[in-house]
Image: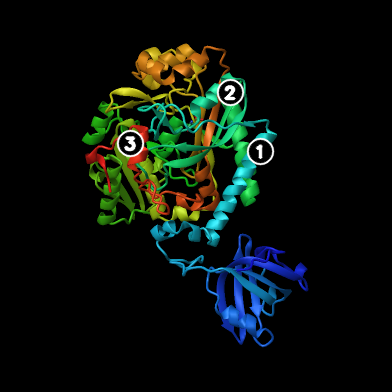
Amino acid sequence: MKFVKRTEKCGLLNSSKIGDEVILNGWVASNRNLGGLLFIDLRDRWGIAQLVIEPENFPQLAELGRTLRSEFVIWAKGVVRKRESVNTKIPTGEVEILLTDFGIINQSLLPPFEISDLTDANEELRLKYRYLDLRRNELQNNLVVRNKVYQIVHKYFYENDFMEIETPLLMKSTPEGARDFLVPSRIYKGRFYALPQSPQIYKQILMVSGFDRYIQIAKCFRDEDLRSDRQPEFTQIDCEMSFVEQDDIISIFENFIKVTWKKVLNVDLQLPFARLSYKEAMENYGSDKPDTRFDIKIKTLNTLFQNTDFQVFKQTLENNGIIAGINAKGCGNYSRKQIDTLTEFAKKYGARGLAYIKFSEGTVTGSIAKFLSEQEIQDLKTTFQVEDNDLILFISDKWTRTYTVLGALRLEIARQTGIIEQVKNKFNFLWVVDFPLFEYDETEERYVAMHHPFTSPKIEDIPLLDTNPGEVRAIAHDIVLNGVEIGGGSIRIHDADLQKKMFNLMNISEKEAEDKFGFLLTSLKYGAPPHGGIALGLDRLTMLLIGTDNIRDVIAFPKTTSGLSLMDNAPSFVDEKQLNELGIAISPNSKTM
Ligand code: ASP
C-alpha cells in the first residue's frame, strides 16, 4: 500500500488555498453518496476536510471510493475549490478538495463504537479501545488544552527564573499520608523502592543545595482507595522557593493562574484572589474548600440561643458545641418527604438529625418551631434576613461536625434550587490560609499533620506546641476554585530541632524518624535556607479549564476508578521467573482474579 506524503493538513485548509493542488493524509471520518457525487470527510489532528469524487470524470476513483470505510487511512490528491454550500460549523467549511487521485494506506476493522462527538458507547468500552476514543474531537481538544497548560508552565516559570529539575521516580518509601506504591529491587532482594507520592523531600533538599526556585511537572503516585475524581497516578505542577514568605509563593501562583486563564480561555481574572482563614472558611461555608460563587452563608447561633429552653440546643451549649444554621431561601414549601431526604443527606455527613423551621404566609412551622420563643424567632428573622417561604436548617453538634454538615447542606440546597447552574460560568478563586498544623486522629489516638509533617507552624504559635498543639496554626495555603481544591503548599520547617519536635508530637519515635527521614533531618543541619512551596494538580486544573467533571477526560491513558487500565490490562500477573528473580512469592490466599 503506497503512501504519498501530505502537502497540507486537513484541518488547516482554508479559502487562501483555492485553486492549489494539495495532498492530504488522514482517517476517513465518513463517506457518503449524494446526488451522484461521493463525499469523504477526512480527519487529522487539526480537523476535518471534505473530499469530493466526481464519478463521471473519475470512474476508477469512484469505484475505489465506494470501498472506503470509517477509519481507513488514506492519501488524497486534488484541487481545492470553494464549496457550493458552506458549512459554518467547521473551520474548513468554505472549501473542499476535488480529488484527482487517492490511495488506501491502511485499512481499519469496524470500530466497536462510533467515533463522533455524540458517541453513546459506555466508558468501559471506550477505555478498552482508548486509541479510538482519543480520535474523538472532545478528547483531542482536551489534550490540546492540557498541552497548552504544559507550555504555559514551562514559559511562565522559566521567565520567572525557576529551574526545572527532575526528581527520582524510584525513591525511598517515606509515606506522606497515603500508601506508597512499591517497586521490588532485584539486586537487593527483599528491599523496595517506592514511587513518589510527591517530590516533597527532594524539592526541599534541592533548596538546601541552593537551587532556589525549582519547578517540575511531576508524576505522583498514591495507593489510596480511589474516588471518581482521583487517579492512582496524577500530575502536579510542583514548586519550591528559598528565602521567601508565604505571600511570595501566593503571588507567583496567582499570577500563573491569571496568565493561564487568559491564554487558554481569554478570561481576565482580577488579582489578588480573596483570602480566607481556615476558621473563616469553615464558619461561613462549612468547608476548607468553599464554593463562594453563591451567597448562602452559615450563621453561628450560640449567642442567639444563649438563654434557650430548647433542650437539644441547651445541651450543645453546655458541651461547648456549636449551634448554626443556613437559610434555604425559597424552600419554605418543601414537603415532609423533601425534608426527610435532606435529613438523610445530612446524616451521611455525620449529623444526628436535622432541625428546621419554615416561614410561610406569616406562620412559623417545622420540627422545632414550638420550642422557640417569640424573641428567638424574631432574632432568627433578622439574622437570616428571612422572607416569606424561607426554610432555616439547624445543626447543633461539635464545631467540626456542625460546620461540615451545614457546608454540605449549603451545596445541596444550591444544587436543588438551581443556583449552581446559574453560577456555572463564574470562576471564584480564593486562598485558604492559617490551617491547623495538626488534626487529631481518633483511631490512632495521635496528632497527624494536616498538610504534611514538614509544614512550619506560625512563628507566634510555636509556644503552643508545648501546651496546646491542637491550637497551633500552620503557614499553609490551599488554592480553591469553585469549591475544588486545586493545590496546596506551605512554608517548611528549616530547623532540624523543630522538625524533630514535630515528629515527636506526632508520636513518631526518634528511631522511626531517623529511619524514614534521617537524610532530610541531616540535610537541614547543613545550612538549610528558609523555604516553602506549593503543588497544583495539573489534571484538576485542566478539568476546570475545560469544564468537565471526569478526570479521565483530561488524561491520555487513565485508569478506571478501581485502578485498572482496561486497554493493556494493568495490573497483571507476571511470570514465575520474574518473581523468582525478585525473590518474591505470592501467598496463595492473596491472589485475586
Ligand atoms: N507536596 C505537597 C503535596 O503533594 C505540596 C507542597 O506542600 O508543596 O500536597
Dividing the image into 4 quarters, which one contains the N terminus?
Answer: bottom right
Single out the mark in the foreground, 3 or 2: 2
Q: Position of residue 537 (x, y in %)?
A: 51, 40
85 above or below 447? below
The disc at residue 386 is: none
Where, by quadrant of the figure, is residue 230 drawn?
Answer: top left
**Distance between the Cα atoms at labels 1 and 2?**
20 Å
Name the kind of residue labelled 1 in the image: Tyr
Single out the mark in the foreground, 1 or 2: 1
Where, by quadrant of the figure, is residue 15 drawn?
Answer: bottom right
Q: Position of residue 420 (x, y in %)?
A: 45, 52
Identity of the residue drawn at 29% across and 46% down: 356
Q: Secondary structure at mark 1?
A: helix
279 above or below 53? above
Name the kind of residue labelled 3 in the image: Thr
In the picture of the structure, the residue carrying the numbered disc 2 is: 245
Q: Is residue 70 left or right of residue 182?
A: right
**Closer to the camera in the image, 242 or 312:** 242
Identity of the residue drawn at 62% across and 40% down: 153
- Using a 10 Å C-alpha cutoff, classify the residue at mark 3 as few (fewer than 14 neighbours), some (14 to 19) or many (20 or more): many
- Using a 10 Å C-alpha cutoff, classify the residue at mark 1 as few (fewer than 14 neighbours), some (14 to 19) or many (20 or more): some
Q: Earlier in the sequence, mark 1 or mark 3?
A: 1
In the picture of the structure, the residue carrying the numbered disc 3 is: 402
Regarding residue 476, the answer to whether it shows in the image is no
Q: Secondary structure at mark 2?
A: loop
538 above or below 144? above
**Distance between the Cα atoms at labels 3 and 2?**
34 Å
In the picture of the structure, the residue carrying the numbered disc 1 is: 156
In the image, is the residue at mark 1 within 8 Å of ligand 1 by its beta carbon?
no
